[in-house]
């Protein structure tokens, strides 16, 4: 047995560990509570807590923490020791069910979007038993949800779990209509492909923009980029390979199913991808993956960059969210299957998803809206800001055949649907379309708009909720049908006919598609400042509250938090750019000009007929561009001050989008031009060539 196989999950309190360490009656009661989504009784929690503590201390743990995901998008933790002192000066390790189930971190210092005032500090963390506890850095980590004192969700996990319950409830209703009475639960499953950059830490430390913002605010493209297409799937450098081995081993110990690793398109860019898990576990595990990437990179002398667009001129990093639905009996509902009746069932779920994506395209767009992702979407490396669905030519033909009451054109390898009024269709239904925002890839949908550092909970909350809404509508209609087959056919025909505008199998990078999308009436929201406010549109609030995913006040709070994050991100970038340009680039250019002027004066003083015209012209040009740089610094400073003074948050976001970002871009353009003809010994920061091509 390989070492990795022996150690897989060794740092996680998995079901197999619980089965081994808990009394049989306790394990059965616990598992029943999991399956039925019921609270854990106090007496059961005490037994579990004791077993969990014993297991964790055997792993070297001295502390425990309730590990949660506040609305910052990252994880949070407060560590408490197991130590309980005795009157005689000794101590024992204790851990109760009460401590396992509930914690109380300060809720006033996390973003709440107005849900909590500064003086209202009480908040609760509540154990999520559906996500395994684990040991890391001598600490027992307990995945938890995070609530306010008044009961509102202050985290990413709670609404994700709610949305999973919502889509499960409605999917089960639909499955009952297909005779699947044995299905009690449907699970949203996710596999998140994670892209990232590895660069030398010494270069990272010398780039204030990378340290403070995660991306380079200045930098002329290197002479060589990704145009030779020689990095994608290329041979791994030894140092990169060593990093990936360490990362895999650390992930496997925690029970995170890391499966694939390879070089990505851009130089110094890479990817890892896991096996599918429940959406909740996948979200927890992706947060851990990103944390471990950064930590392990340091050990290998790297900095791991997870920004959506750390370097201009080469591909940024995304995170493809592969989403599907599976029953508790193991059936993937997005697999056409071999059983004829499953094909009609598949088409029903497909229709619900197509309708959901069309009607709630703006929600999907804003679920990935960040200041960083604005640099990536639509840049011929990621899908455009227009949401569309790729089905592939064969599956599209099936949809059109339904609409037109005909058989599909391709007669090869067809499956009989099993409903007399529905056409048969081929099993092999798709190619792959790397330009599509939402592509069907055989047995799942690949949502490709996510940025690398995004918490995947947000997009999956949206996906689960909008599909739950359509399945609810389908179930209500079909449950009332007197003739199921006829009503199903009418429903599918009507749904596909109404929503076929969202289906696009062509090149999403082609500008002609944007024109075509506009003709179809598809929304095109190019930036986060415009996208985010739609979160609180009346229809969106309606479906969130209807399915119990968000309350009205929770929707408004999250809208405010997303906009504030956008504003603060762009503001930090502006201040950082001003600082670098003012304190590093501008003085370096002036220094070079002074040295060049001295050289010209010296040559002219020799009075031996040396022509200094070219050098003088060069100095004049360099000085003029440097003067432009100084003016651009002043201009950016002015609009930044103006934007900060705007009091209404949505208007402030517009000010940053329409004024600060253009001023920031102009400053960069001038600085990058100066980099082109300033000698390397004078340029104050590592260049793209240094960063992307010098690492061994």
Image (cartoon, helix red, strand yellow):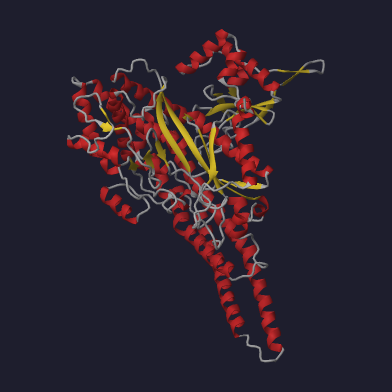
Left or right of residue 324, residue 304 in this image? right
- Relative to 268, does residue 335 appear above or below in the rendering? above
Residue sitting farthest toward the top: 25
Residue visible at 60% across and 22% down in the picture:
13
Which quadrant holds residue 257? top right
Q: Nearer the viewer, residue 68 or 575?
A: 68
Residue sitting farthest toward the right: 88
Left or right of residue 317, residue 418 in this image? left
Quadrant of the image for the N terminus? top right
Q: How many marks?
A: 0
Q: Measuring from the top left, give residue 526's x and y in whole percent.
A: 39, 51
Q: Measuring from the top left, give residue 172's x and y in whole percent.
A: 35, 21
Q: Nearer the viewer, residue 208 or 636?
A: 208
Q: Nearer the viewer, residue 224 or 426?
A: 426
Q: Is residue 684 visible?
A: yes
Q: Is residue 46 visible?
A: no
Q: Measuring from the top left, give residue 446's x and y in whole percent.
A: 41, 39
Q: Measuring from the top left, give residue 130's x and y in whole percent.
A: 52, 23
């Amino acid at each position: 047995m390989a070492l990795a196989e022996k150690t897989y999950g060794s740092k996680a309190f998995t079901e197999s560990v619980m089965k081994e360490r808990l009394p049989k009656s306790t394990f059965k009661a616990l598992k029943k509570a999991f399956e039925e989504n019921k609270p854990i009784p106090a007496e059961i929690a005490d037994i579990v807590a004791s077993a969990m503590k014993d297991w964790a201390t055997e792993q070297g743990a001295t502390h425990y923490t309730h590990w949660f995901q506040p609305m910052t998008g990252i994880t949070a933790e407060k560590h408490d020791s197991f130590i309980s002192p005795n009157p005689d000066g000794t101590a024992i390790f204790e851990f109760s069910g009460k401590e396992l189930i509930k914690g109380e971190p300060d809720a006033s210092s996390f973003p709440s979007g107005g849900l909590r005032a500064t003086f209202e500090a009480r908040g609760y963390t509540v154990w999520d038993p559906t996500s395994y506890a684990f040991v890391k850095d001598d600490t027992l980590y307990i995945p938890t949800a995070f609530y306010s004192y008044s009961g509102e969700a202050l985290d990413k996990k709670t609404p994700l779990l709610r949305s999973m319950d919502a889509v499960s409830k409605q999917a089960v209703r639909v499955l009952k209509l297909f005779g699947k009475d044995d299905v009690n639960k449907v699970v949203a499953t996710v596999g998140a492909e994670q892209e990232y950059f590895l660069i030398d830490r010494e270069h990272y430390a010398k780039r204030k923009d990378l340290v403070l913002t995660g991306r380079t605010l200045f930098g002329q493209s290197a002479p060589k980029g990704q145009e030779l297409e020689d990095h994608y799937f290329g041979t791994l450098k030894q140092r990169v390979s060593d990093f990936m081995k360490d990362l895999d081993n650390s992930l496997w110990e925690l029970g995170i199913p890391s499966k694939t690793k390879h070089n990505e398109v851009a130089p110094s860019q890479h990817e890892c991808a896991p096996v599918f898990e429940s959406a909740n576990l996948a979200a927890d595990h992706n947060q851990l993956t990103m944390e471990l990437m950064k930590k392990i990179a340091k050990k290998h002398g790297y900095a791991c960059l997870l920004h959506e667009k750390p370097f201009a001129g080469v591909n940024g990093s995304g995170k493809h969210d592969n989403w599907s639905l599976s029953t508790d009996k193991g059936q993937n509902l997005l697999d056409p299957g071999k059983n004829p009746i499953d094909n009609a069932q598949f088409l029903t779920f497909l229709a619900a998803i197509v309708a959901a994506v069309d009607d709630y395209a703006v929600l999907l767009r804003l679920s990935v809206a960040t200041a960083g992702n604005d640099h990536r979407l639509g840049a011929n490396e990621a899908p455009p800001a227009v949401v569309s669905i790729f089905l592939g030519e064969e599956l599209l033909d099936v949809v059109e055949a339904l609409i037109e009451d005909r058989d599909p054109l391709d007669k090869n390898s067809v499956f009989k649907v099993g409903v007399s009024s529905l056409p048969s269709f081929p099993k092999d239904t798709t190619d792959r379309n790397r330009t599509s925002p939402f592509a069907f890839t055989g047995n799942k949908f690949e949502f490709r708009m996510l940025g690398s550092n995004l918490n995947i909970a947000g997009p999956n909350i949206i996906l689960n909720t909008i599909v739950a809404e359509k399945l609810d509508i389908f179930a209500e209609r079909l449950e009332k049908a007197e003739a199921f087959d006829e009503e199903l056919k009418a429903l599918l025909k009507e749904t596909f006919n109404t929503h076929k505008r969202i289906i696009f199998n062509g090149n999403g990078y082609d500008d002609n598609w944007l024109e075509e999308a506009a003709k179809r009436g598809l929304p095109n929201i190019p930036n986060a400042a415009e996208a985010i406010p739609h979160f609180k549109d009346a229809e969106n609030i309606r479906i969130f509250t209807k399915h119990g995913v968000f309350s009205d006040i929770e929707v408004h709070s999250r809208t405010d938090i997303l906009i504030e994050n956008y504003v603060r991100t762009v503001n930090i970038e502006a201040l950082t750019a001003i600082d670098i340009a003012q304190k590093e680039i501008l003085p370096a250019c002036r220094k070079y000009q002074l040295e060049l002027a001295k050289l010209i004066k010296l040559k002219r003083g020799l009075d031996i007929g040396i022509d200094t015209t070219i050098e003088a012209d060069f100095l004049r040009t360099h000085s003029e561009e440097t003067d432009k740089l100084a003016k651009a610094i002043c201009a950016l400073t002015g609009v930044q001050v103006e934007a900060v003074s705007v009091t209404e948050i949505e208007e402030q976001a517009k000010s940053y989008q329409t004024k600060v970002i253009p001023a920031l871009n102009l400053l960069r353009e001038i600085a990058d031009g100066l980099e082109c003809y300033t000698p390397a010994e004078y340029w104050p920061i590592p260049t793209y060539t240094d960063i992307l091509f010098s690492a061994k």
